[in-house]
Amino acid sequence: MSNAVLHVSNVQKSFGGLRALTDIDLEVEQGKTHAIIGPNGAGKSTLLNVCIGRLPPDSGKVIFAGQTITGRAPYEINQLGVARVFQTPEIFPDLSLLQNVMVPAFAKRDGTFRMNALSSLEKEKELRAEAEHLLEEFGLLHLYAKQAASLSRGDKRRLELAMCLIQHPKLLLLDEPTAGMSRHDTNRTIDLLQRIKERGMTKVIIEHDMHVVFSLADRISVLAQGKIIAEGAPDEVRGNPKVQEAYLGGAH
């Protein structure tokens, strides 16, 4: 598997008579950003759901960091070091920004989303300091005490990323992270994801905005009707006439 941290091997998935994924083979290299593009209904989100254990494949397997994770529960896969950012930001709307970032840190450490009253005060101080540092890095520290429900979509996305990063994941899966954002918020999110990339974190990103894809991706897989029809470096995919016509509108 070379330097792959994630290996999807011969995965198939059907819903009734509809084949959603067919013979999917995919390798994601350590420290790289791997984009998956394709039209609506191509099977992109289904593939991510198989990878995080939300959906069982009909056949095939998923290997993460050398371990087969097929059949494991989502929380077990998360504990191994896989975090996912969903199309709609999944936050705790009634909690403050600081609480939102600290809750997954407790969950990662203690295996529960309850703040453990028996945890050491010193450890909790460390987690709070790390949460505040992430909020500052993402430009949200001045809002730390506000309810998360009051944030704009772009700020909710940045909050969700902070909630993922405090778990120190080995692999970050992002499902359309800029969907519904203004161009200003999209560019801010690109800058943030580029900073994460500089840390060497491995990422898989599903995205329809080709500006986002070509700004971030080291490698791109093109999915159509549940099959990978093309794969390669961004320039290879950009120059592929079939991909260009189908997904990129013929634009260079």
Image: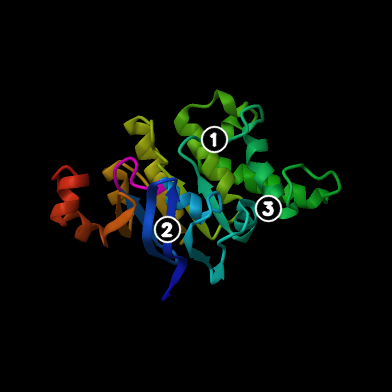
Q: Amino acid at mark 1?
A: Leu
Looking at the rendering, in which quadrant would you find the N terminus? bottom left
Amino acid type, residue under disc 2 in the picture: Gln
Report the magenta stretch's main SS. loop
What is the span of residues highlighted in magenta in the rendered image?
38-44
Q: Amino acid at mark 3?
A: Lys
Q: Judge left or right: residue 51 versus residue 74.
A: left
CB contact under 8 Å: marks 1 and 2: no
First in sequence: mark 3 or mark 2? Answer: 2
Q: Nearer the viewer, residue 78 or 140?
A: 78
Q: Secondary structure at mark 1?
A: loop
- What crowding class fits label 1: few (fewer than 14 Cα within 10 Å), some (14-19), or many (20 or more)? many
Crowding around mark 3 (Cα neighbors within 10 Å: few <14, some 14 to 19, many 20+) is some
Mark 1 or mark 2, which has the lower sequence index? 2
Residue tagged by mark 3?
108
Q: Is residue 166 above or below residue 170?
A: above
Q: Percent from the top left, x then y, of residue 38?
A: 29, 47
Q: Earlier in the sequence, mark 3 or mark 1?
A: 3
Determine which residue is flagged by label 1.
140
Residue 235 at x, y = what percent? Answer: 20, 58
Residue to which mark 2 is pinned: 12
